[in-house]
Amino acid sequence: FHFDFYRMDSAAEVLNIGWDDYLDAGGVVIIEWADKFPEIIPAGAHWFEFKTLVDGARSVEKRQA
């Protein structure tokens, strides 16, 4: 499942679209802009940061929540 929190205005808005149902569905949940509402991200989630480097290449780094 893919979510883009960029266009969401509040954690309540995310919860109202059935957030918990997606988490309980047993699939993989990918969230862009997850740091907007970290309070609803489950403990133990994996966080990754994507960066564009000076030469145009991209890097992906795992980071702590």
Image (cartoon, grey):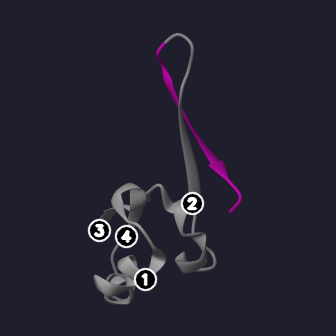
- Where 3 falls versus 53 (above or below)? below
The local secondary structure at tag 4 comes to loop
Stretch in magenta: 56-65
| Res 31 quadrant in image | bottom left
Q: Residue 1 bears which disc, if any?
A: 3
Labelled pair 4, 3 in contact (Cβ < 8 Å): yes
**Residue displayed at 48% across by 19% down:** 57
The local secondary structure at tag 2 comes to helix
> How far, Cα to Cα, is label 2 from label 4?
18 Å
Q: Alpha-carbon neighbours of circle 4 within 10 Å: few (<14), some, or many (≥20)?
A: few
**Residue displayed at 58% across by 58% down:** 47
Residue beneath disc 1: 12
Residue beneath disc 4: 28
Sequence order check, earlier mark of 1 and 3: 3
Labelled pair 1, 4 in contact (Cβ < 8 Å): no
Labelled pair 1, 2 in contact (Cβ < 8 Å): no
> How far, Cα to Cα, is label 1 from label 4?
21 Å
Check disc 3 and give the amino acid type.
Phe
Q: Nearer the viewer, mark 1 or mark 4?
A: 1
